[in-house]
Each structure stands twice: as structure tokens, then as C-alpha cells.
Amino acid sequence: MEYKEPFGVKLDFESGIIENAKKLVRKLSDMKGYYVDEEAYEKLLKEDPIIYEVYAVEQEEKDGDLNFATTVLYPGKVGSEFFMTKGHYHSKADRAEVYFALKGKGGMLLQTPEGEARWIPMEPGTIVYVPPYWAHRTINTGDEPFIFLALYPADAGHDYGTIKEKGFSKIVVEENGEVVVKDNPKWTE
Ligand SMILES: O=P(O)(O)OC[C@H]1O[C@](O)(CO)[C@@H](O)[C@@H]1O
Ligand SMILES: [Fe+2]
């Protein structure tokens, strides 16, 4: 039997950076069609801000192994809609995931394939269990970077297609200084 080598890596709680991790950057231009207010999207595209960065430590896509990644999700809004991750189902849809909030303020929007949605607020110390089959997207509702760690099966994979096409049934916006979760006007079953 060939055993993999165990290892420890350092996560910097301030920056969210995991040493030697693979870095992925998502800018606004990578998220066309994701935000409801297209006019606000086009306007902000001139600056093309970084929406989030991911620091991932991933293994081969094998049953039984685990990946982990931090995400640094920046504060901001497109129109009234808070900056968010793309969101995805898992390619192997029955794979679960755990998120652990480290810094800042935000939450997770989850959704079943039938469009049943849940909003779970997150602050440092919040652990979120993402059950099998639920799509998940994180959202920064604060004014500093929202940083969290995710742990997920190495063979889970990312299915971005469905969310890219249809979005979530709910959106998270600021209304009169309040965080409001409301129906997505563009949602169709
Ligand atoms: O993959 P998305 O939807 O862009 O969101 C980024 C975060 O989600 C993960 O894909 C895990 O679910 C991580 O790689 C990262 O923490
Ligand atoms: Fe995931």
C-alpha cells in the first residue's frame, strides 16, 4: 500500500491566505449575468473589481479524499445586490460540504434543485453544514472582507452551469441600510 504523506499548512487569519495554496481570482468580468441589475453591472465593469479570491488545497478527484479552501470575498454591491460568489451545485450532487466563517460578516444562500432556498447568516465562528444536493453561494453583507474556510470531498466537483443560467430563487440586497433576502425577479422555475 502506498500512503499519501500527511501535511500541515498555515492559514493566516488576517488575510485568509493559506500558504502554498492554488490562488484563483474572480473579477466582476468573470460574473456576467450573475447580478440582477445589468445596468449597474455594466457601469461597475469599467473598474472591474476583484469580487473574491480563493486559496485552495486540492487533491486528485478521488472518492474518500478531502479538499479545503479559503475564500476572501470583498465588500461591495452591484446596484443594491451584495458581492457574492458564483455559487454551484456539486458535480457529484450528493456530496456535502462544511464552511467555517473566519472574518467579516455575510451569509450563505442555499437552494434545492426545486428552488427551495435558505439563508444562513455567518459571522466569525459560524459553521455551516451544506447537505448533499443543495447549491450554495456566499455573500458579503458587511464592509470588510468576508473570509471563510470550506472543506469538501475531493470528488465533489463544481457544477456552475445551472446557477449561471437560472441564478438562485432569492437575492440578497441592501434596502434602507438593512440586509434583505428577497425573491429574485428574474427567477423562473
Ligand atoms: O466555487 P464558487 O461558487 O465560485 O465559490 C468559491 C468557494 O466555494 C468552493 O468552490 C467550495 O464550495 C471553494 O473552492 C471556495 O471556497
Ligand atoms: Fe461546494
Image (spheres, rainbow, N blue to C red):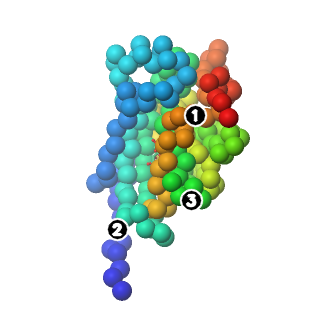
Q: CA distance from mark 2 to mark 3?
A: 24 Å
Residue drawn at x 57%, y 44% as measured from the top left: 136
Question: Which residue is tagged 3?
Answer: 95
- Closer to viewer: mark 3 or mark 1: 1
Question: Which residue is tagged 1?
Answer: 166
Q: Nearer the viewer, residue 148 or 43?
A: 43
Which is nearer the N-term, disc 2 or disc 3? 2
Q: CA distance from mark 2 to mark 1?
A: 40 Å
The type of residue carrying mark 1 is Lys
Q: Pointer 2: residues within 10 angstroms few (<14), some, or many (20+)?
A: few
Residue extending farthest left:
20
**Residue 37 seen anywhere in this rendered image of the structure:** yes
Image quarter hosting the C terminus: top right
**Residue 14 seen anywhere in this rendered image of the structure:** no
Relative to 55, say whether 65 is above or below.
below
Q: Nearer the viewer, residue 38 or 105?
A: 38
Secondary structure beneath label 1 = helix
Question: Which residue is tagged 2?
Answer: 7
Residue drawn at x 37%, y 64% as measured from the top left: 60
Image side of residue 153 versus residue 127, left or right: left
Which is nearer the N-term, disc 3 or disc 1? 3
The type of residue carrying mark 3 is Arg
Image quarter hosting the N terminus: bottom left
Q: Pointer 1: residues within 10 angstroms few (<14), some, or many (20+)?
A: some
Residue drawn at x 53%, y 18% as measured from the top left: 37
Residue drawn at x 49%, y 58% as measured from the top left: 156
- Closer to viewer: mark 2 or mark 3: 3
- Closer to viewer: mark 2 or mark 1: 1
Residue 11 % position (x, y): 38, 52
Residue extending farthest bottom:
1
Disc 3 C-beta below 8 A from ligand 2: yes
